Image (cartoon, rainbow, N blue to C red):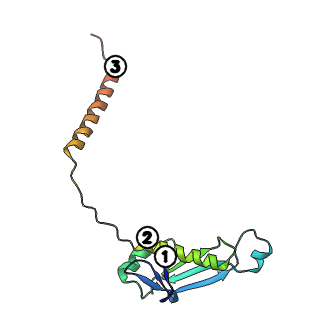
């Protein structure tokens, strides 16, 4: 995921994003926690300028923007936050891992579907099931006595 020598996040084989493109901001977490939560900024907010990233081409930006539209604002900036842990470092690792996972899923190009024909057996099974259902309904009908 993170190569120490290059300081880049490996998203896919073709896409790597330098850590310099990610911005981390630390704020106070919400919820219970007493004095610790009141005094320390352990929640991590990650922002990534999706629209202005030189690491992604236009097609990848469009695919990511469409797939991650709930995380991207009008300016094309992706926002993620983590406050799972009381540790700033663990929250930073968590939000970075979530970012990599989201980007991997967003940049995956779905395989093109090639339509196939139904087999003779599947057609026959479907028609047999329809005939059975028709027979059941026909048997339910009331018959008039002559």
| Tag 3 secondary structure | loop
Residue drawn at 56 percent across, 85 percent down: 23
Tag of residue 119: none
Mark 1 and mark 3 in contact (Cβ < 8 Å)? no
In the figure, 121 relative to 5: above or below?
above
| Tag 2 secondary structure | helix
* Visible residue check, residue 91: yes
Marked residue nearer the N-terminal end (3 or 1): 1
Tag of residue 100: 1
Marked residue nearer the N-terminal end (3 or 2): 2
Left or right of 1: which side holds 35?
A: right
Q: Nearer the viewer, residue 13 or 4?
A: 4
Left or right of 71: which side holds 28?
A: right
Quarter holding residue 24: bottom right
- Give how far across and how far down residue 36 sits, in percent: 77, 76
Left or right of 34: which side holds 116?
A: left
In the figure, 56 relative to 133: above or below?
below
> Residue at label 2?
105
* Visible residue check, residue 66: no
> Residue at label 3?
142
Q: Nearer the viewer, residue 42 or 129?
A: 42
Q: CA distance from mark 3 to mark 2?
A: 57 Å
Q: CA distance from mark 3 to mark 1?
A: 65 Å
């Amino acid at each position: 995921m993170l190569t120490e020598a290059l300081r880049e996040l490996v998203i896919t084989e073709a896409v790597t994003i330098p850590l310099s493109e990610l911005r981390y901001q630390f704020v106070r977490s919400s919820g219970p926690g007493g004095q610790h939560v009141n005094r320390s900024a352990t929640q991590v907010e990650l922002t990534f300028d999706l629209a202005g990233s030189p690491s992604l081409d236009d097609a990848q930006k469009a695919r990511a923007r469409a797939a991650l539209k709930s995380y991207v604002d009008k300016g094309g900036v992706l926002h993620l936050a983590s406050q799972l842990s009381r540790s700033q470092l663990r929250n930073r690792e968590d939000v970075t891992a979530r970012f990599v996972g989201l980007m991997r899923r967003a940049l995956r190009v779905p395989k093109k579907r090639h339509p196939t024909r139904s087999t003779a057996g599947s057609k026959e099974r479907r028609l047999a099931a329809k005939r059975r259902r028709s027979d059941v309904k026909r048997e339910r009908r009331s018959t008039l006595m002559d």
